[in-house]
Amino acid sequence: MTGKTQTGRYDHSLQHRAFEVGIFLKALDGVLECIGGMLIWFVTPALLVRVFRTLYGHEIFRMAGEQFGFHAQAVSQKFASGSKLFPSLFLASHGITKVLLVIAIWMNRLWAYPLMILVFGGFSVYQLYRLAHTHSLMLALLTLIDIAIVILTWREYQEQRAVHRMRGGRKI
């Protein structure tokens, strides 16, 4: 992943550093999604409802406002009444995909760049669709971050292709 252009300055550019930080955060996000998927699968809905009720009973959550408590309880009850299969598989597959792509990028696999662009581009399109229905500020922020990662990945891919060509096309 670390390469230099003819000027030798790319490794130290702000763009390259932003790319490295961005994919590290995507890897961390992927690990958290995998954990979340497993928790959804293994934690019973009744336990989740009890946890939210217990947490909301503490003063710190009361200070956060009643809206938080109502929202947390509504989410836990909705989860309790639904199937665990879809959200569990959705989170786990998202997480595994992100982690594997980031590992491939860290291992300098040139094929991983276009795949990452395709996958995160697809995630962004779906998130824009969801955003049109939910108007969630958090989803809008996450979508902007994913779009930035796609742009940074494209630029990094161009740099890595140039480095690959300069090395005589050896497989990386």
Image: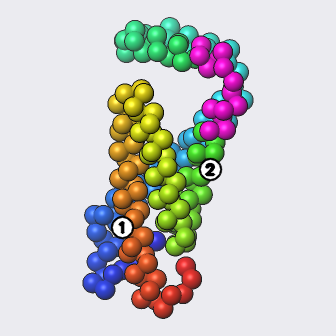
Q: Residue at point 45% right, 52% down? A: 121
Determine which residue is flagged by label 2: 96
Q: Is residue 108 above or below residue 81?
A: below
Crowd rating for badge 1 (residues with CA inside 10 Å; few <14, some 14–19, many 20+): some
Which residue corresponds to the image point at 60% horizontal and 57% vertical from the top-left?
100
Quick one: quadrant of the C terminus?
bottom right
Q: Position of residue 101 (x, y in %)?
A: 56, 59
Q: Nearer the viewer, residue 103 or 122?
A: 122
| 85 in the magenta segment | yes
Closer to the observer: label 2 or label 1?
1
* Element on which disc 1 rests: helix
> Which residue is depicted at the point 36% across and 80% down?
4
Q: Which range is magenta?
A: 77-90
Quarter of the view holding residue 84: top right
Q: Position of residue 42 (x, y in %)?
A: 72, 29
Along the line of sight, which residue is nearer the eye, 69 or 92? Answer: 92
Instruction: Report the residue marked by disc 1.
Output: 155
The correct choice, above or below, for 119 with respect to 91 in the image is below
User: Hey, what amino acid is under mark 1?
Assistant: Arg
Tell me residue 123's x, y (percent).
49, 46
Q: Are marks 2 and 1 in contact (CB under 8 Å)?
A: no
Closer to the chain start, of discs 2 and 1, is 2
Q: Is residue 57 left or right of residue 91?
A: left
Give the alpha-carbon distance from disc 2 to disc 1, as whole Å.
24 Å
Q: How far across and how far down the image is residue 120, in percent?
A: 48, 52
Secondary structure character of the magenta stretch overall = helix
Q: Is residue 61 visible?
A: no
**Residue extending furthest bottom?**
168
